[in-house]
Image (cartoon, rainbow, N blue to C red):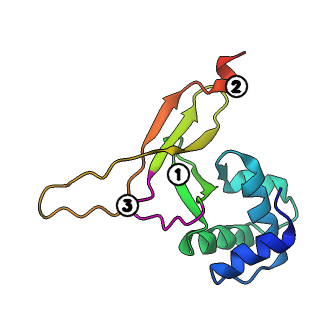
């Protein structure tokens, strides 16, 4: 688990003021080992304002600390970006895996999505590749 000083340094490096809530959300995302929905974060911090948590996630997303994952469930999930990630379409895209049994979604950062050349006149703004199936935990049950 990251210590608070390290989290503060990571946030400051992205020009984010390290408030107590931002530090807590960062630590939660770092320790989760899966993508989390806003509802998951709300459940963890029961007394925190929903809008504060949402604004924290949006700030993290704008500054390249987290990325959104649309896994087909209709619920946006968030995961920490890799170190040195810029969330660029040509460099930083990776696979995601959604387990149809436990409903967990994880980043498979070691499996990069190759650059796809689009036809003339098309401009990519986002890409998301989700593989659905049974994760290793559920598969061993």
Image coords of residue 80 (percent x, y): 63, 58
Q: Secondary structure at mark 1?
A: strand
Instruction: Point out the stretch of residues depicted in magenta.
Output: 83-93
**x and y percentages locating residue 108 in the rendered image:** 54, 42
Which sits in the foreground, 78 or 30? 30
Q: Which residue is mark 3?
A: 89
Q: Nearer the viewer, mark 1 or mark 2?
A: 2
SS of the residue at dot 2? Answer: helix
In the rendered structure, find residue 69 and report the number of the disc placed on it.
1
Query: Can the viewer see residue 84 in this picture?
Result: yes
Counting residues from the N terminus, which is met first, the one under dot 1 or under dot 2?
Answer: 1
Taking the spot 26% from the left edge, 51% from the top edge, the residue there is 116
> Which residue is at 71% across, 45% downward?
33
Q: Is residue 107 placed above or below 19 in the rendered structure?
A: above
For marks 3 and 2 on the same chain, the one whose residue lies earlier in the sequence: 3
- Report if residue 106 lies within the magenta region: no
Q: Is residue 41 visible?
A: no
Position of 128 with respect to 74 (left or right) is left
The image shows residue 36, relative to residue 12, as above or below, that is above
Residue 137, numbered label? 2
Q: Which mark is residue 29?
A: none
* Quarter in which the C terminus is drawn: top right
Q: Residue at x 53, y 51 (%)?
A: 69
The image shows residue 87 at horizontal and vertical percentages of 47, 64
Viewer-nearest residue: 59 or 55: 59
Q: Residues within 10 Å of mark 3 (few under 14, many from 20)?
A: some
Mark nearer the N terminus (3 vs 1) = 1
CA gap between label 3 and label 2 equals: 30 Å
Q: Left of 4 or right of it: where is 88?
A: left
Confirm or deny contact between disc 1 and disc 2 (CB under 8 A): no
Residue in the picture at 58% in, 28% down:
100
């Amino acid at each position: 688990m990251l210590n608070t000083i390290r989290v503060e340094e990571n946030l400051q490096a992205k020009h984010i003021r390290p408030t107590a809530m931002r530090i807590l959300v960062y630590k939660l995302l770092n320790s989760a080992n899966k993508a989390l929905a806003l509802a998951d974060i709300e459940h963890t911090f029961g007394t925190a304002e929903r809008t504060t948590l949402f604004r924290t996630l949006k700030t993290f997303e704008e500054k390249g600390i987290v990325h959104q994952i649309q896994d087909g469930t209709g619920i946006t999930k968030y995961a920490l970006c890799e170190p040195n990630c810029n969330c660029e379409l040509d460099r930083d895209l990776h696979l995601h895996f959604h387990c149809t049994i436990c409903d967990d979604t994880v980043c498979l950062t070691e499996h990069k999505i190759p650059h796809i050349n689009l036809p003339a006149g098309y401009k990519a703004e986002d890409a998301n590749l989700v593989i659905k199936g049974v994760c290793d935990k559920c598969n061993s049950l």
